[in-house]
Image (cartoon, rainbow, N blue to C red):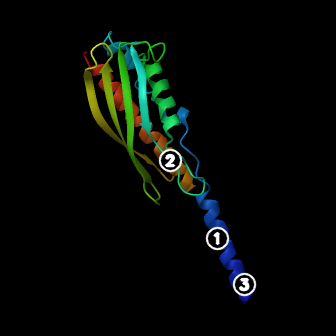
Amino acid sequence: MKYLKFGLVAALLLSALTLTGCATAARSDAMVASSVVAPVAANASKKLLGNVAIGDVTGGSSTNPMWVSKVGGAEFEKALEASLKGAGFLSANRQAGDYKLVADLREVNQPMIGLDMTVTSSVEYQLIERATGNNIYRETISAPYTAKMSDSFLGAERLRLANEGSIRSNIERLIQRLAALVP
């Protein structure tokens, strides 16, 4: 009887580990905003197109595989850069461009458990005119994204998908704001 209980407990623990899986970090390529690229290029201010350099990008956390998925600062920066490039805003290099974009990943609000997992990211963006040092745009954008049980059976994978979707949505909102901006 004692061995039966031990076997049952071991089987339950193994099942729990199989269902949750190990945490993996959000991937930069999955956070790239792509759904807003075509309309942005057509409507954006000609002053901004090809004229925005990435400045300081701060925030983010490293993922501990034994805990939960996080959004790393370097991955966020790569996604932001690729998104701006895809939308036509990115300058040739960080020293070029009349405008500098500064981003601070303030918060990634995550659930601990759940079937459908909603993550909300908050990023403060500033667009600074290099010549004058003037802030021509400053806003904290919050963007939720829900990864459903149908997206992945594994909770750790759903959380990673929700992280990526939230950052992607956040960057999409930034690009839409930049497209509407007339410096």
Q: Position of residue 119 (x, y in %)?
A: 41, 48
Residue under circle 3? 4
Looking at the image, is mark 3 or mark 1 earlier in the sequence? 3
Q: Tell me residue 127's x, y (percent).
A: 32, 24
Give the Cα separation between the discs numbered 3 and 1: 14 Å
Residue bearing mark 1: 13
Q: Is residue 91 left or right of residue 151?
A: left
Q: Secondary structure at mark 3?
A: helix
Instruction: Assess whether mark 3 and mark 2 are in contact (beta carbons under 8 angstroms).
Output: no
In this view, the mark in front (2 or 3): 2
Q: Is residue 137 above or below residue 51?
A: below
Q: Can you tell which quarter of the image residue 130 is in?
A: top left
Which residue is pictured at 64% across the width and 66% down the height? 15
Q: Residue furthest top?
A: 46
Pick the quarter of the image with the C terminus.
Answer: top left
> Which numbered marker is on residue 70?
2
Q: Is residue 46 left or right of residue 64?
A: left
* Residue 30 coordinates in the image, percent (x, y): 53, 35
Which quarter of the figure has residue 58? top left
Residue closest to the far right:
3
Element on which disc 1 rests: helix
Residue type, numbered disc 2: Lys
